Amino acid sequence: MTKPASTKAARNARARASMLRPLAPIVPPLNVSGRALMVVIAIMSFLCALTLGAVTMVQEKAEDWQGDVSSEITIQIRPAEGLDIEEALREVRGIALSYRGALTAEIVDRSSTARLLEPWLGEGFDMDELPVPRLVIVTIDEAAPPDFGAMREALAESVPSASLDDHRAWASRLITMARITVLVGVGVLSLMVSTTMLTVIFATRGAMAGNRHIVEVLHFVGAETGFIAAEFQKRFLMIGLKGAATGGGLAILAFLLLGAWQSNSLATAANDQVTALFGRFTLSGAGYVGILGVVVLISVMTAFTTRLTVVRTIREIDRQRADPSLAEME
C-alpha cells in the first residue's frame, strides 16, 4: 500500500528542516559560573607564570655571574711611598701574562677607577688625595687556569704592595646564594602550582554544580557516562585554555613592558636601583616556553578535573536512584 503524497512531502519537509536547523550544543554556552572560573584561572595562571619567569631569570643570572667571576682574576696595587704606580701596573701586567693560562690583562685607568668610586665618593673627587688602589683585570682560561700560588710569589717579589684575588671565596658565596635563591624560588613556584591546582579543582566543581541538572537530564534520557563527560570536558577545556592563555599572556606582556622600561630609562636613579636589586628583566626563550607549559598544564588539569567531577556526579545520581532515601537525606 503506497503512502499518500502529502505524508511523504511532510516527512521530507521535516527532514530538510532538521538539516537546516543548527544543532544546539549539549552543554550550554558560557554562563556566569564559567566566566567566574575563567577569571580565577586567569589570575592564578598570571601569578604562576610570573613566579616561573622570576625563577628562570634568577637561575640564568646566577649562571652568568658564576661564569663572569670564574673567568677573571684581579690584581690590586695599593699606593705606597716612593712607588711609581703606573710603572708598577705595567710590571704587574707583564708578570700576569707570563703565566700559561692567562689570556689577557687590562689595566683599569684612572677615569675608569673614578667611575667605579663615584657611587660612594660622588663626582669630582681628587684621586691623588686618597690612597685609591689600582687594578689589573686578568682574563684566564677556565679549563686550564694559571698557577695562582706561583703568580702570587712573583708579584710579592716584584711589587710587594700588589695582591692577587682569584675570587674563589666570592665565587663560593655567590654560588651558594644563587642555589639558595633558586631553591626558594622553586619552592614558591611549587606552592603556586599546588594552589593553582586546588583553586581550579574547587572552582571547576563549583561551576559543575550549577550544571548538575543538565547532567541529570542527559543521564535520564540514556546518554552514556563517557559521552556526557566528554561533552563537559570539551567545554571546560576551552574555558581553562582561554583563562590560562589570558593569564600567561599578561605575564609575558608584563616581562616585555618591564624590559622595555629598563631599556628606555637607562642611567636613571630608579632604573639603577631596580637593576641593582633585581637585575635585568629579560626573559629567555626557556622562560617563555615554561610559561606556555603552565598554560597547557592548567588547561589540561581543568579538563581532567571536569571529567572526574562529571563521572562522580553521575555515580551519585545512580546511587540516589537506587536508594531514594539518600536523596531525601541530601
Image (cartoon, rainbow, N blue to C red):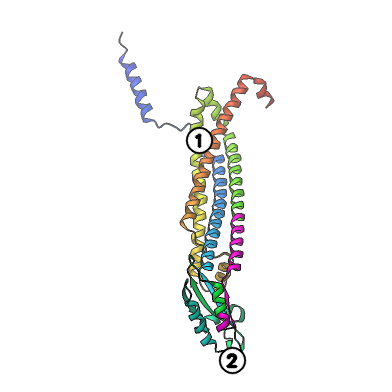
Circle 2 packing at 10 Å, graded few (<14), some (14-19), many (20+), is: few
Q: Which residue is mark 1?
A: 233
Instruction: Specify which label sits upstream in the sequence, 2 or 1.
Output: 2
The quarter of the picture where the N terminus appears is: top left
On screen, 168 above or below 161?
Answer: above
15 lies left or right of 146: left
Q: Which residue is mark 2?
A: 82
- Position of 258 compared to 198: left or right? left
Which quarter of the picture shows residue 62?
Answer: bottom right
How many numbered dots are placed on residues in this image? Answer: 2
Question: Where in the figure is residue 244, as x and y percent of width and height?
Answer: 51, 47
Q: Secondary structure at mark 1?
A: helix
Badge 2 element: loop
Q: Residue at x 55, y 87 (%)?
A: 85
Quadrant that contains the C terminus: top right
In the image, 144 versus 248, the foreground residue is 144
What residue is drawn where x is 32% and y is 20%?
9
From the top left corner, tell me how far across and down residue 12 is, in percent.
33, 22
CA distance for labels 2 and 1:
84 Å
Q: Residue at x 58, y 62 (%)?
A: 175
